[in-house]
Amino acid sequence: MTLAKVLARARAGMDLEREEIITLLETADPEERSQIYETAEALTLYYLGPEVHLRGLVEFSNYCTRNCNYCGLRADNHRLNRYRMTSEEIVAVAEQIELMGLKTIVLQSGEDYWYTLEMMTRIIQEIKQKTNLAITLSLGEREFTELKAWKEVGADRYLLKHETVNPDIFAEIKPDSSYEHRLGILDQLSQLGYQVGSGGMIALPGQSLTDLADDLLFIRTNKIGMAGFGPFIPHGDTPYRGYPSGSGELSLLMLAVARIVLRQVHLPATTALETLLQDGRRRALEVGANVIMPNFTPLEYRKLYEIYPNKAQTSLDEVREVILSLGRIVGTDSGDVLI
Ligand code: SAM
Ligand code: SF4
């Protein structure tokens, strides 16, 4: 099928087939890529309007029990200085995030069991008592009893990327995780009533465009409401130090195709894309992104949350300026998922 036909079917609201998604991802001609970008932008405005939702990110611990081969926080990286924020520090940042006008806090960390069920419960309760923020958790593969308890005290969303839907690549990149277990947790989260976010990395060793198409089908089939796709960026203190970085241009194309395939799913302009691509945040907003996660991690800790090197930093003012300069507006509600 020609590109024009695929894009016409997408504009008519049809579910694209696997082969059609691969056709989009294989598009190399700049003129044809522009047609994909224009369609993605039109569909963003049609399904979601001009609102861009801001989520305040707090990376509260860089301790991790796991050894993912791609990530600088892996347990065996002994060159990294580790930190943990106290409950008081986390709640204080939450109050600051609300003061700055944001509606959602994202609490992210390595997989760090020092934060017990009870401790996270108290943190969530306190944030809920002191603010009106929606709470997104991104704490890795925690136990069902924990996920249930945190939902009951007010956690709204959970972000757990499937990373790649190719089981062989998953086994290579996350040697101490189980593919079935991680996907099973995504099911548990939906059953518990969380708004669920997932997603993956682009240009992992051995990954093909077909794998990326399957990643998008995974999100669509499982009715996942948020999906973050960003390029893999190698970190010098990991076993993957010698692999090439993902391409910024392919990551931008993947974002546009994600919008075309997934319609009203929330798609962030990822920090990894901003890190690799000049003006990446603006370009992401132009081709399908409707979420940005400004970083509120206190500066002394931020540089230690080094999942990959040279992470892009953008201030809240810059983010607001980019949104407005594109004729978009900053979302004024909590930006719940729409599916
Ligand atoms: N520990 C939790 C987990 O793994 O789900 C949450 C924190 S983890 C740092 C958040 C995300 O960072 C991962 O889901 C992964 O996609 C991304 N990430 C880690 N290392 C990366 C790298 N080298 N390049 C690009 N993304 C990376
Ligand atoms: Fe730990 Fe998450 Fe990094 Fe894996 S990706 S090493 S679980 S922080």
Image: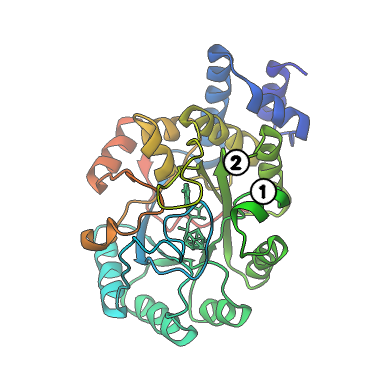
- Could you tell me which residue is drawn at 34 percent across and 37 percent down? 323
Check contact, mark 2 vs mark 1: CB within 8 A: yes
**In front of the other: 271 or 236:** 236
Would residue 328 be seen by someone viewing this image from the given angle? no
- Could you tell me which residue is drawn at 57 percent across and 69 percent down? 141
Label 2 near ligand 1 (CB < 8 Å): no
**In front of the other: 12 or 24:** 24
Above or below, comparing residue 269 to residue 103 in the picture: above
Marks 2 and 1, the one that precedes in the sequence? 1
- The image's colouring method is rainbow
**In front of the other: 156 or 48:** 156
- Could you tell me which residue is drawn at 30 percent across and 42 percent down? 319
Would residue 231 be seen by someone viewing this image from the given angle? yes
Q: Position of residue 326 (x, y in %)?
A: 35, 30
Label 1 belongs to which residue? 169
Q: Where is residue 181 in the image (x, y as percent from the top left)?
A: 69, 67
Above or below, comparing residue 255 to residue 271 in the picture: above
Label 2 belongs to which residue? 205
**Callout 1 amino acid:** Ile
Q: Quadrant of residue 306?
A: bottom left
Label 2: which secondary element: loop
In the picture, the quarter occupied by the N terminus is top right
